[in-house]
Amino acid sequence: MKKFAAAIAAVGVLCVGAFLYLDHARGGIIGFTMKRALLGNDGSPARAEVNGISMYYETYGFGPPVLLLHGDFATVESMHHQIRALAESYLVIVPDRRAHGRTTDADGVALSYSLMAADMVALLDTLEIEKADVVGWSGGGMDGIEMAIRYPDRVGRLVTYGSSFHPDGLEPSSLAMLEPDNPSLSQVRSFYESLAPDPDRWPVYLGKMSEMWRTQPELTVADLATIAAPTLIMVGEHDMVLPAHTEELAASIADSKLVIFEGQDHFAPLMAPEMVNREILAFMEE
């Protein structure tokens, strides 16, 4: 009996160790998701009907409003480190962006960052929020940039990580991940199918995302120069966004600050959240 108990304990230790390893490798998303499944969502999940879609969003904390936007091919869960850090002092509003996660898509309507920016303004209207700070990672940051240009009165401070303002700003090799037979897409597809209102829509979703990546956003330096919001531009030293492009982005916005994280890549908000959150919080409190 003692040997059996010891064997069970050893298996348990191995299982916990494997879980912790996988959870760490995925930036804590597995643990965050499992905790919510077991204990319930400690945020306030809700839906808003905006611009012909049903948008899923969650709110956390209390205080000045912050709109927190995940990147392309991601969901609310990818921002869990930023949710926790910001919710201590702010009302954090974190949606699944159009066609992502639990938010629906619209048939026959192409995806664009300008359209997603309009969705976010409509969400703020629904919540009766006149102005919010916007923190966006990758495509979420592009939504934020579009908001600051097209709806300047709705954006307080703007924070982006790994965002571009033109397709030429991406490493050419990054487009290879959009190929349907790319093995790295299998996990993205699995997560999509587990959350999407219509899991069979994956081919449509991938086609729309591929087209958007190849053609959007299409902003100019003159467009960026109209941004009046205080702006923090962050990027990893080895990001998929080209260094010169990020430097031009920051240089084109008058009231902006550029932070480059040495040794980091596009996924620092998830894999190195302490340093990213430190910069975000310091900027928000200036």
Image (cartoon, grey):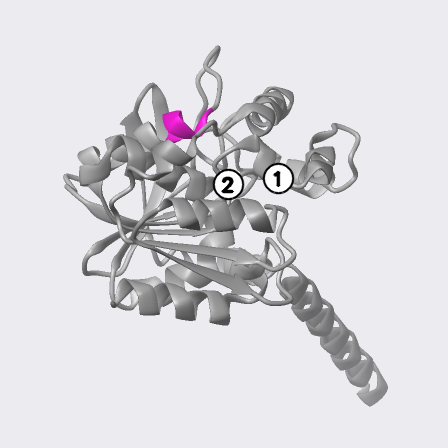
Q: Which part of the image, by quadrant, shows the C terminus?
A: bottom left
Question: Disc 2 vs disc 1: Cβ atoms closer than 8 Å?
Answer: yes
Q: Position of residue 186 (x, y in %)?
A: 73, 39
Numbered badge on residue 164? 2
Membership of 114 in magenta stretch: yes
On the image, which quarter does residue 183 sit in? top right
Q: Tag count in the figure?
A: 2
Q: Is residue 57 above or below residue 218?
A: below
Name which residue type carries label 2: Ser
Q: In the rendered structure, which disc, 2 or 1, sits on the residue that comes first in sequence?
A: 2
Residue 105 vs residue 86, the one in the foreground: 86
Q: Quick one: which residue is furthest to the top in this view?
A: 108
Numbered badge on residue 170? 1
Membership of 68 in magenta stretch: no
Q: Position of residue 167 (x, y in %)?
A: 57, 32
In the rendered structure, the answer to whether residue 74 lies left or right of residue 281 reads right
In the rendered structure, the answer to whether residue 52 lies left or right of residue 79 reads left
The range drawn in magenta is: 112-116
